[in-house]
Amino acid sequence: LQEAGMSESEAGALLNDARALCRERILRDSGIPMVSLKKYQKAGIVDPEEFCTLHPVYISSRTGIRLDTVYKHVEKVCSFLGRRSPEKIGQAAVERGRKDLLRIPGIGEKTLESLYRAGIVDPDGLARADPEQVSIQSGIPINALNEYILALKRSSRTEPAGPAGQAATR
């Protein structure tokens, strides 16, 4: 491109524009409606790979698109790319998990969204998670994650016992 008289910055901008058009074309070709595509773009979710790597609950929370619609779009894009779609989680389960996670001291809406980015949608997922991996995916410091997990374990010990002596689930 420099031989054609373009500066390095102009060539870089042209290449970025071409990449953006290619990503948009893949999303459109996979069946994402333009109205949804604009919402994904506004939320910064523009790379088709993100549909296969980001958790649908996170995508839904960032875009405001209904979770069931996001799952349909994720399935379309992942299928188009030859990738496996994530397991579906129902809206009711997500809402229960959200309420339960927000009960953990230190977890607010911003932290919740970061947990969603790492695929953590309920306290069980947090309890089973590898704090180091979640920290990398979410940006939450490991010491904060360890505190959340400790608070979660403390609260599960103080809940009334459920069947067979297990802590009752919320």
Image (spheres, grey):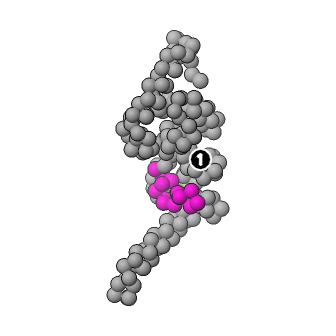
Please determine whether, in this image, residue 153 is positioned above or below residue 120.
above
* Quarter occupied by the C terminus: top right
Q: Mark 1 packing: few (<14 Cα in 10 Å), some, or many (20+)?
A: some
Q: Which residue is at 61% across, 62% downward? A: 38
Stretch in magenta: 41-53
Residue 31 appears in the rendering: no
Mark 1 residue element:
helix
| Type of amino acid at the residue the image marks with label 1 | Ser
Residue 167 appears in the rendering: yes
Q: Magenta span has 42?
A: yes
Residue 154: x and y, percent? 48, 20
Q: Is residue 104 left or right of residue 139?
A: right
Dividing the picture into quadrants, the one containing residue 30 is: bottom right
Residue 116: x and y, percent? 52, 42
Residue 39: x and y, percent? 61, 58
Q: Which residue is at 62% across, 35% downward? A: 95
Q: Which residue is at 64% across, 51% downward? A: 65
Q: Magenta span has 49?
A: yes
Q: Which residue is mark 1?
A: 61
Please determine whether, in this image, residue 146 is positioned above or below residue 53.
above
Residue 25: x and y, percent? 53, 68
